Image (cartoon, rainbow, N blue to C red):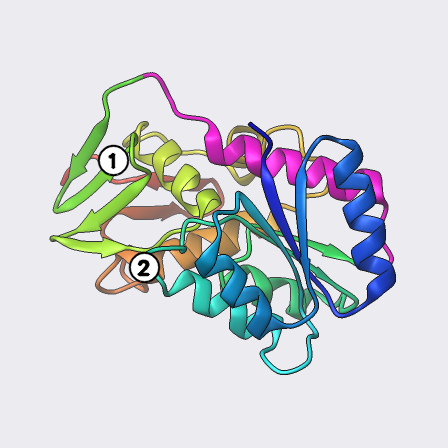
Amino acid sequence: MKKRILIVDDEKDILELVSYNLGKEGFDVSVSATGEDALHLIKKGKYDLIILDLMLPGLQGMELCRTIRNDPKISYLPIIMLTAKGEEVDKILGLEMGADDYVTKPFSPRELVARVKAVLRRTREKPAAENRIEAGGLTINKETYTVTCKGTIIKLSATEFKLLLFLAERKGKIFSRDRILDAVWRDEAYVEPRTVDVHIRRLRAQIEEDPDNPRYIKTMRGVGYYFEDKL
């Protein structure tokens, strides 16, 4: 079955360019020019990934991303931000709002297609191990891609889930940023080590009672991150 992708951008040329290149790769593509229309389509239909422009008329891309992440019915959707803003602060803000990846205009269509495939690959991969991990009130279900903390459902993006799962399956083992990039982002050539820090910070904000004094995801200064094994 073809993967369904929704492209949200108010530039007609961008919609046509991205639609054409994704269509050539066998994807089922829909388009939207406004955030409001996109949100309606997302809630009405079933998509596998959203390509979202930051600057939109009406409902802005950042706000749409936040709305998706706060809705349990659609919070799982992978999101790639597509925008003309290329400053580091904009990239980090997009990631912190829940985007799985970030592409700046002008962009290479081949690069965008590669990123789409990589994000979808991360989303569908499921480790062949036990279906649940439980640690100190935190439960990770690898079949349903859900996380609960003391009975409360935690809304994570596909990349956040895979990062948490990678660390939780290897409790007590310390991993450098580069090692985490290799494991979670695999062979993507455009991901910077800084991305790991952003996702760790987002994860802590979601699952930790006190993100500044984390219980689950710990930092070994100068070395990397690890999941606490004494819970």
Of residues 199 and 60, the one nearer the viewer is 60
Q: Range of the magenta residues?
A: 105-128
- Please provide percent x and percent y for residue 175: 45, 34
In which image quadrant can residue 89 be found? bottom right
**Residue 178 visible in the picture:** no
State the mark number for residue 22: none
Mark 2, Cα crowd under 10 Å, few <14 / some 14-19 / many 20+, is some
The C terminus - image quarter: top left
> Disc 1 marks which amino acid?
Asn
* Contact between labelled residues 2 and 1, with CB atoms less than 8 Å apart: no
**Residue 99 visible in the picture:** yes
Q: Indicate the secondary structure of the residue bearing disc 2.
A: helix
Q: Which residue is mark 1?
A: 141
**Residue visible at 47% across and 40% down in the picture:** 223
**Residue visible at 66% across and 28% down in the picture:** 187
Point out the tag, 1 or 2, that comes first from the N-terminus: 1
Instruction: Please indicate whether residue 209 sits to the left or right of residue 55 in the image.
Output: left
**Residue visible at 42% across and 58% down in the picture:** 202
- Please provide percent x and percent y for residue 193: 61, 46
- Please provide percent x and percent y for residue 192: 66, 46
Residue lying farthest to the bottom in this orientation? 58
Which circle, 1 or 2, is nearer the viewer? Answer: 1
- Please provide percent x and percent y for residue 117: 65, 34
Q: Indicate the secondary structure of the residue bearing disc 1.
A: strand
The N terminus - image quarter: top right
Q: Which residue is mark 2?
A: 206
